[in-house]
Amino acid sequence: MNAIITLTTDFGLADAYVAAMKGVILDINREATIIDVCHTIAPQNIAQAAFILSTAHQFFPARTIHVVVVDPGVGTERRAIILRTPRFDFVAPDNGVLSGVIEPFLKERLRPAQGQTALPPELEAVSITRPEFWRSPVSPTFHGRDIFAPVAARLSLGAAPEEFGEVIRSITLLPEHRPYQESAGTLVGRIVHIDHFGNLITNFKRGDLPEEPFAVEVSNRFISRLSRTYGEGEGLLALIGSSGYLEIAVKGGSARDFLGAAVGDDVKIKLGKR
Amino acid sequence: MNAIITLTTDFGLADAYVAAMKGVILDINREATIIDVCHTIAPQNIAQAAFILSTAHQFFPARTIHVVVVDPGVGTERRAIILRTPRFDFVAPDNGVLSGVIEPFLKERLRPAQGQTALPPELEAVSITRPEFWRSPVSPTFHGRDIFAPVAARLSLGAAPEEFGEVIRSITLLPEHRPYQESAGTLVGRIVHIDHFGNLITNFKRGDLPEEPFAVEVSNRFISRLSRTYGEGEGLLALIGSSGYLEIAVKGGSARDFLGAAVGDDVKIKLGKR
Amino acid sequence: MNAIITLTTDFGLADAYVAAMKGVILDINREATIIDVCHTIAPQNIAQAAFILSTAHQFFPARTIHVVVVDPGVGTERRAIILRTPRFDFVAPDNGVLSGVIEPFLKERLRPAQGQTALPPELEAVSITRPEFWRSPVSPTFHGRDIFAPVAARLSLGAAPEEFGEVIRSITLLPEHRPYQESAGTLVGRIVHIDHFGNLITNFKRGDLPEEPFAVEVSNRFISRLSRTYGEGEGLLALIGSSGYLEIAVKGGSARDFLGAAVGDDVKIKLGKR
């Protein structure tokens, strides 16, 4: 069956770990279309993988199967899960790596959830426990190849999630860092990702921003207006990026290098003209 | 339809920008075969993208659709275009990135064209202006995902270029750096690309070279004969590389590291024995 | 025909060499599924390519065609070959890059073979000599594009290996570095690969290890027991990795960085409690 399976891992590009997973998938479903989302997640960086996945999974055709293997607890007690949303399936360790996928479904809640969190009603999840669908023997260090890949391949042939284990009603979420109000005129957010161009992607969504005028403060510098594109003005600029988050960029350059900024750094919104 | 779509970008490998484009394409044409040409073009380096594309696009099946997103002017006034050649289609910003594709069609001209240049008669081009084929809303910073990808996908389903906008009769070309004669016995060219192996690829085509004997001068060193393969002789060597250009290489090593050479450096041909 | 062709090269990610090969393959067999195994083999490192291929080729569907282009002798007298095993086909230079594929078939022999070695009876090989299947003219520096890719594509359409040249009965093998007994209580092996996570993969297979207790010595440090997963204990650990080799790892870190280790370094097994 011509299903689409995507792969997001921290396996890098110097080994054949990703290829081994693809071989396993194709050996079960020869017709699968396998697409790489990203394999350069920093080793064991669950938050980065959650962010990357949140910026790409939604553009794929309905019922695409997204496999994520950023799995510092491989071989330990951490669960492996299938998550079914109204539009997609995910196969991943239950370590928070699907947080960015699940958050939009939690949006009505007053406070962000984290840790073991009850699943919203639109979502189903299964703990992958039935070994008859796995490669045998399972390497304790490579569940990507021996569990996630064959499970995803069999899902792509039409198996139901419940065939792979028990239905579960809670899932692990990362702590969500949302901007907060520090004082009357100041909102505090943070850099959640720095992309290949050195653009600083913050956790301010479009709807988090007040009416202009306001200034964006980052690394002791102020940006007094929002630009629309990377090609406007000169030097440091702020705009709403393609995933809907406030971004800091430098025209023709790298904001990371220009500012010496890092993931986790504060970014503030200061109301009023400056 | 089982069309082939290739992607050439400066998006790097650390984000999901490329994957988002692939998702958009597959969501429109599930049967498309998507092939990566290169995603590690230096950020916003239009000339490098033009060179890379010129060394690979021609090997694909007829009517392959080549998408190029190296686009420093994204969201500004620069045009987005479809270029149709007798054999391929291209979807790209009109910023010179297709120069290497167009140059062979200009070959009869006395002087190289640059800037806005009239299209040769074998080529058709369209300015992409009709938003009904785009994703909506369009991010001003990611036309790759919201314009180029859906346009390429719809082209791959059989849409005609004219459905996407107005026919145009000129296109932007980069200045072409051709070797020139500096004095009676000396031709001057330059390094246009340095590949992964550290081989220095020049702008001397086979036909630009005089009859031997001549010496190749680069970084104050002389190479007195052409080799046929990288495995011949010892140390520094010159040969006609796989794209038909004069290359400088080091057997079992990197000419870039050995010579400290960079793109843009002069390479000279000096007639006579040395 | 929907054949699967994999590619393993040292071409890196900064050029379009890999894309040119894919274009050539698709131009001959539009239905081929092309999978990247690895393109970041260190330039001309045949042993690394042999190792990488040995960890991934076996997971693919039967009759997958594996193409390897790590080819320091391109254009010289070295042979290009097709190797047919009971399960797969390989297209590669005859320079030892298929050693890891062939070794399991040699397993009954007393001493490891190297250099020109008679093929075991289960394997067939052909020297690729008939130019009518190649691109023309052949670049002396890019047989990947002009010979290996078209040969693999035509194999994928059902051509028999014998159509491409003469059957040969010997093949080039790299020297195999197997652990040896240095003294009564000491086995000596070596690091054969360091993966993206900095895990040190040795040449001790599970069956090479004595009964516990024993200690693993590496870089003047001792590890006194085998772990099962990367998530166990603290700091330095040893385990049987996913390819069946003894690995040295650091929980949540890089054993390469922690120990300053390199491929080729000794790893010793010392019998008894420590």
Image (cartoon, coloured by chain):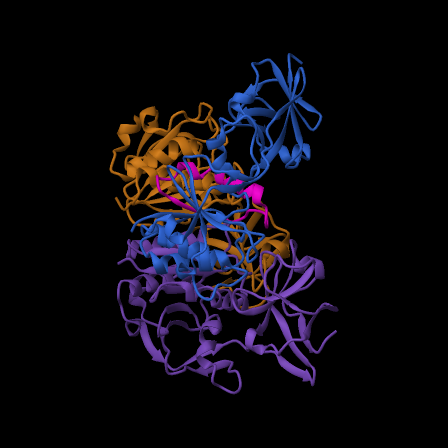
Chain colours: A orange, B purple, C blue
Q: Is residue B2 left or right of residue C201?
A: left
State whether residue A182 appears in this view: yes
The spot of residue A238 in percent (x, y) is 52, 59
Quarter occupied by the N terminus of chain A? top left
State whether residue A59 appears in this view: no
Q: Is residue A83 left or right of residue A199?
A: left
Depth order, front residue of C83/C222: C83
> Magenta stretch containing residue C52, yes or no?
yes
The spot of residue C110 in percent (x, y) is 55, 25
> Magenta stretch containing residue B72, yes or no?
no
Q: Is residue B218 left or right of residue A99?
A: right
On screen, residue A190 above or below B7:
above
Identify the residue at horizontal 43%, vertical 31% (top origin): A143
On screen, residue A203 above or below A253:
above
| Quadrant of the image occupied by residue A152 | top left
Identify the residue at horizontal 56%, vertical 38% (top origin): C195
Going by the picture, which residue comes out furthest to the bottom? B110
The spot of residue A93 in percent (x, y) is 42, 32
| Quadrant of the image occupied by residue C90 | top left
Task: Please state the total of marks drawn on the protein image.
Answer: 0
Depth order, front residue of A19/C149: C149
| Quadrant of the image occupied by residue A145 | top left
Depth order, front residue of B126/C41: C41
The spot of residue A64 in percent (x, y) is 31, 45
Question: Which region shows up in magenta?
Answer: C39-66
Quarter occupied by the C terminus of chain A? bottom right
